[in-house]
Every structure is written in structure tokens, then in C-alpha cells.
Image: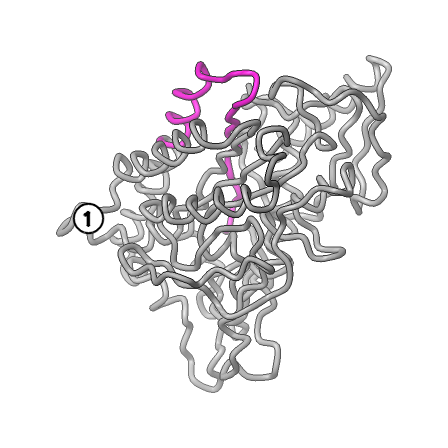
Amino acid sequence: MLFKNLALVSVTVASLFFTGTSAALVNSISECPKLTARTAPTKVSDLRPDDIKLTGALGDSIMAGFALEGITHGTIIHPTSIFEYRGQSYGGGGDDGAVTIPNFIKRYNPKVRGASVGEHLAELCYGPLCPPFQYRPLRDVLNAAQSGGMAMNLDYELTYLINTMKFMTAWEYDDQWKMINIQIGSNDQCASCIDEFIPMLRPELYGKHMEAAVERIRKKVPKVLVNLIGTFNVSEIYSVTTGKDYCNAFDPLEFHINTVECPCALSKSFREKMNENSLGYNREIERIYNKFKPLQTDTFGVMFTPANIDLASFPVQGLSNVDCFHPSKQGHEFVAKSLWNTLFTPLANKRGDISFKDTKIYCPTDSDRFNLN
């Protein structure tokens, strides 16, 4: 499958060459040439990276960059072990030099706003446990993700996101193109084994919450492109972390935090349930994409970006050594590059699995558009 993906990329680059344009795969987004200036587009189907004025994000602790920097002071017994490094989040971060989707967009529009910056203690929103007044707007900016967040918490996150967008843009709210990255579902998977007793996290309920969020965006946010990112199959990380000294955060004790952090992963039979729900969540996301696709207007559009990342192919260093569950900085950078490279291709070309490797960054051309098909 990997060779099939590489072939698709080669065909894409070759076709661009033969149509008189040029495309490149580079090590750093700074190596990509700027796009030729043009009149601002009037249709969501005509959007390029340089058209985006605001980036926002909804999600869970992965989107919030939890534990991204790993153990930073020689011991896990330190406040930074429960920090969110939001400025380096693959889908919401904007720290200088960070390898993130918002920073890739910033290469083409230096004035884009909305990416989160810096780091701070984790903000917790876990199902019904969602304390108010946790957001730090100066750092979170438009990254509304919450550690512990589940699909049922999207409405809570969206309230912060919409209110902050309006505050930031004032009278320009209706006129600026916005891109919102949404990825959530890891915590839903990790608690899904309770569905046998309390049916809260079944795929159809996940889809209900996700669909309600997209519908609210459609009604309340003008000039917006919603990027629905598929869920990771999180049970795969246990094939990477089992028996690895790297994950012994409480050395010399042989204890891995990820064995309790994701309760449904304790049993292999429960992991099967997690896998089933992950597939079900992704089916629901695609169903929602297909439902809203016919509702596309000049100022509202939805794209589906499968996250078919083979977590079992990760080196253990792709995960944070705080818990060997959340992606490390290396993991976030790989995800950012891998998903960015698919944003300009049709959905049919995004289906294959993506294995961990030294991934180049695609440089969009003047003729490229965010592909909603």
C-alpha cells in the first residue's frame, strides 16, 4: 500500500510538470515558493492556502499537544509533565518554526491568525466533567481542543471557538476565510468498553455529536472550510510500547502510564472493541462529509481527511515518554506533514495507509486548491 501511495504522489507531481506547472517535495516549508498573488476568491471551492485568514481547531489532548515535549526536567514528577504544548500541535499550533498545518498556511499568508502558541498546564474536559473558565485565549487563541475531550464535548469547544473568532475579527467576521481542523475520538475509543453497560460512545452517538458540530458551524460561521480529520486507531500503539524501557517513566519501576491512561486497552478483548469503534467513528465522519457535501455553498464547504496513519509503524520516540500514548514532537511533525500532503488531492487518493518515514512536505502550486472532492 505504501508503494501505491508513493506512486500516486509521483503521478501527481509528474502531471503537474506536464501541464506546465511545477511542484516540489521539500524538507522545510520555507523552501516552498510563494504563490502568485491574485484576487480574493468568492467560492470555497477556489481556496488556496494564501486565502485563509483564520485557522481554528477542535479536538482532544492530541490536538492540544499534551505532553508533546516529553519528560523535560529529568523526572516525570514535574508540572511540565502535564503541560499542553499547544504551539506545536500538528493541527492547531503556531509557534515560530513549528512543523504544523497552520504554519504551513502561514508560509503563504504571513498574516493568518488563530494558531495557538506556547504551553501551559492541561485544560481538562472529559465527557460530563468540563469545568468552566479554563481557556487561556492569549495562548489557546482559536485552538479550542481540550485534554480529555470526547465527541460529546464538541459543542462546548465550539462555543469558545465561535465567540473568540467574533472577538478577534469584529466587523470582519463575515468577510474572512476560515479553516477549522477537527479531530476527536481517541478518548471515546479508550472508554468505549463501557458501552456494554452505558451506551454513550457508540459510533452512531459519536456521529450525532460530530454532525451537530458541523451543522452549527454551517449556520454560525461564514466563509468557512471545515476539515474533518479521521480518528487514529489508538490500540496500535501498544504493539510499539510493550516492553520498551523508553516508556518506564517511573524507572526503575516497570510501569507504563499508558496501561491505565486508556482503560479499555487493559484487555485484548477490549482492544477489539476499540478497533471496532475506531472504524465506526471513521465511517460516521465520512457519512457526515457525504451529507454536507451537497449542502456546500459559495461560503461553506467540508472536506474529509482520513488519518490512516499506521501507528504500529511509529518508532517508540514518535510517542511522548511521559506516557507513551500521546504523540511526541516527532510524532506531531510527521502527522502534520502527512496530512498536509493530502489536502490538495481528491479523497480517492487519500485511502491508503501511511507508514512512518522521513516525509517531505508538498509545495502547492498556483493551480492547487484545497480539494473538497
Q: Is residue 308 rendered to the left or right of residue 201?
A: right
Taking 274 as reference, is 289 above or below it? Answer: above
Give 12 or 151, whichever is nearer the viewer: 151
Element type at mark 1: helix
In magenta, the rendered stretch is 284-311
Compared to 245, does 202 lie above or below? above
Does 51 sit left or right of 232 as displayed?
right
Q: Residue at x 59, y 60 (%)?
A: 139
Q: Is residue 123 magenta?
A: no
Q: Tell me the amino acid under the disc marked 1.
A: Asp
Q: State which quarter of the image contains the C terminus.
A: top right
The residue sitting at 31% across, 46% down in the picture is: 152
Residue 193, percent across and down?
A: 23, 52
Task: State the image quarter where residue 17 is shown.
Answer: top right
321 and 95: which one is in front? Answer: 95
| Residue under label 1 | 195
Q: Position of residue 153 (x, y in %)?
A: 35, 49
Q: In terms of image quadrants, where is residue 339?
A: top right
Would residue 103 appear left or right of 183 to someone viewing this image? right
